[in-house]
Amino acid sequence: MDPLYARYPFFEGAREAVREAEISPAALIAEDAPAVERGKERVERALMEGSVAAEDPRRWDTREELLSYPIARILVSLIETPAAVEKYAKAEAATARERFQTDFASDDDLQSGGRTRASLEEVLREFGLADAVRPEQAGGPGSAARPGARRGGGASAGGRAPSHYWIELGSYLDLADAEWGSRWRLVNREVAVGEVRVAAEELSRILEAAVERRVATGLPFEVRGTDGGDAIAEAVSAAVADLRSLLNDHDAGRTTVDAVVPALFPPCMKALVRRARGDEALPEHAEFSLVSFLVAFGMDAADVTTLLDVDGDTAERIETRVEYLANADGTQYPPPSCATMQSYGDCVDPDERCETISHPLSYYTDAVRDAGDVRDWRETTTGE
């Protein structure tokens, strides 16, 4: 199987490859194939972290990675809630955008070896945008620089990737959403000769929207209703129940507290803070649990990196995660519940208050309320 399709399983070629291989998701589920476990991880990470990338990519080969996509779609359909579809589609799209940006920046031969990377031209063709997008030429909009060979993006004549592109107005209006911010409103864009000027980063956001739309199309679909479908639903019922419980974390993962008092954090979060400050590389799920907890009551990127005393690549990664969660108002990907923390092995040193709550934020909210007059850590020059 083409490694490119494992990276982008929503490509039409990937779907065709699965069909031609005559691999039945039902058979994979019946034999509890590795792709089923990876499919569950795909959905779990989508619901909890906004990503579908494997926590340990070395565990899965190309075949398992590709086949996990149709399995994930079955699981999402069986969860039977619009929130699952929305989160899953957004996570697939966000992961694809990161991979697109890596691929487009690569100087390697895209067609060599296992063809693990996609070119911008290929992605634009995939989504029917090859004739709608062109790199900005020196002549600017409306100039004669619309040769077919240059349509669809690619490096400029000097060998460097263009910093801006022009996208046809209809395609822009179809994919860009004003809810992304005021700069996306047409009145605030540079428009000429039926085209809209966008930066390379903005084009990546538009492609992300195209991926999200494709992934969401057809979800949810009816799994039950036939003997085969009923058997599939029964076989994955435990996995579906686990995934539904992750969605329930969303309802509990809120607080009205906006003060930062590390001494009142629940034991699990205190432990993660200590580990982070001790230069331990936290597992991705643990880092997400901690950062989403801190963002939930208003900490920004500078606050979080200062509290955790991190720098370099770790600080940059955490800042990116904070900004993403903050842009989602901290509500789309709330911190995990106590049950989820237990399943991760991150529930440590529970105290008496832990026996009365089911979510770390509930613990913190109650602790701050009971403490009365507290001093916000951000008002001091040092942490706890």
Image (cartoon, rainbow, N blue to C red):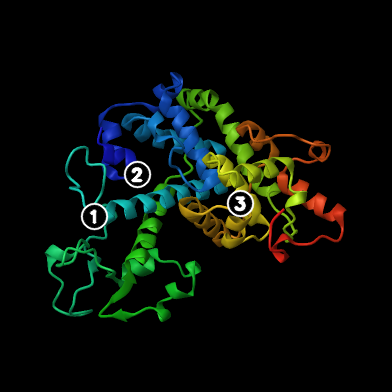
Alpha carbon distance from label 3 to label 1: 44 Å
Left or right, 367 with respect to 41, comes to right
Q: Residue at x 40, y 37 (%)?
A: 69
In depth, the one of 113 and 378 nearer the eye is 378
Residue 37 can be seen in this image: yes
Query: Residue 126 in the image: x percent, y percent?
Result: 26, 52
Query: Residue 313 in the image: x percent, y percent?
Result: 45, 52
Please report whichever mark, 3 or 2, sits nearer to the chain's N-terminal start: 2
Please report whichever mark, 3 or 1, sits nearer to the chain's N-terminal start: 1
Alpha carbon distance from label 3 to label 2: 38 Å
Residue position for label 2: 10
Amino acid at the residue labelled 2: Phe
Residue position for label 3: 308
Q: How many labels does the image show?
A: 3
Q: Quadrant of residue 380?
A: bottom right
Query: Residue 121 in the image: x percent, y percent?
Result: 22, 56
Please report whichever mark, 1 or 2, sits nearer to the chain's N-terminal start: 2
Amino acid at the residue labelled 1: Arg
Residue position for label 1: 125
